[in-house]
Image (cartoon, grey):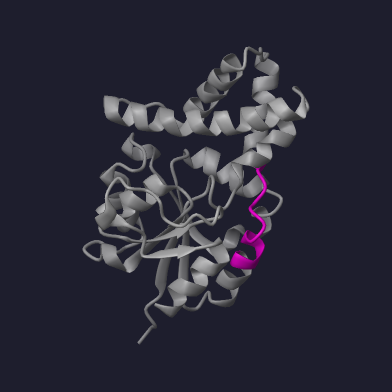
Amino acid sequence: MATKKTVIAFDLYGTLLSTESIAHELAKIYDEDKAKSLAALWRRYQLEYTWRINSMGEYKSFSELTRNALSHAVAEHGLTLSAKDADVLMRSYDALHVFPEVPSALKLLQENSDSVEAYVFSNGTDEMVGNSIKTSPDLGPHAGIFKSLVTVHSLKCFKPDKRAYSHLVEQVGKQGEASDVWVVSANPFDIVGSRAAGLKAAFIDRTGKGWVDRLDEKRSPSIVASGVDEAIKSILKN
């Protein structure tokens, strides 16, 4: 009888890939101080737009919202951005760097491939997620570790909508067994969304502040870990 594998779905942006690394590209257009602030604000509005459009019951693709969030961040800084530079930045978004501990996490997945079934689970479109992984200098060479890329684009909604997690459970072949699926994410809204849908969740706490989200204290993470590698180790011990 085949050994039952542990299903782990990894959030991409902000968990495996650092959206802060886009500051290097922004610094080629603006000064370094503005670049760091712009990168943080771009990410803030990228997420905020997904939540707002979810609440409105409407949909625009993650790539479109990402471009719009960039325009918002630039305007809020009182700056301008040409269409050409916006295109360059969007392409750069497809080649983000990973967080420092991710290479060791990928090694762990490779070493435990007989007992772990790994997926990427993202708000991005199939094209955006595929490009982000293929063109990432760190993730690209290890793309084969992931069984598949699960996105929400076909659903026309974003995390933490419950439909996103039901879709994940279905895509990994665990219908009726949501509690057998792990989501690893550094985004608190993703953790709470996972738990609300009945999945297990590992929160990546890179700031060392612990779990401070208070939306629903009954839906706290199953595991809190300092990095993706530590999360994998803890999951394998469960």
Left or right: residue 181 versus residue 162 is right
- Look at 44% across and 72% down and name the residue there: 235
Q: Is residue 27 above or below residue 166?
A: above
92 or 185, which lies in front?
Answer: 185
In reply to whether residue 104 is colored magenta, the answer given is yes
The magenta span reads 95-105
144 or 157, which lies in front?
Answer: 157
218 or 4, which lies in front?
Answer: 218
One can see residue 90 in this view: no
- Look at 45% across and 47% down and name the residue there: 187
Q: Is residue 95 above or below residue 33?
A: below
Q: Is residue 208 above or below residue 238?
A: above
* Residue 46 spot, x, y in % from top left: 49, 31
- Look at 33% across and 43% down and name the residue there: 160
* Residue 80 spot, x, y in % from top left: 66, 12
* Residue 47 spot, x, y in % from top left: 45, 34
- Look at 65% across and 43% down and name the residue there: 96
Quadrant assignment for the N terminus: bottom left
In reply to whether residue 237 is colored magenta, the answer given is no
One can see residue 107 in this view: yes
Quadrant assignment for the C terminus: bottom left
Instruction: Give the total of numbered labels.
Output: 0
In which quadrant of the rendered view does residue 77 lie?
top right
* Residue 128 spot, x, y in % from top left: 54, 38
Left or right: residue 117 versus residue 106 is left
Left or right: residue 193 versus residue 74 is left
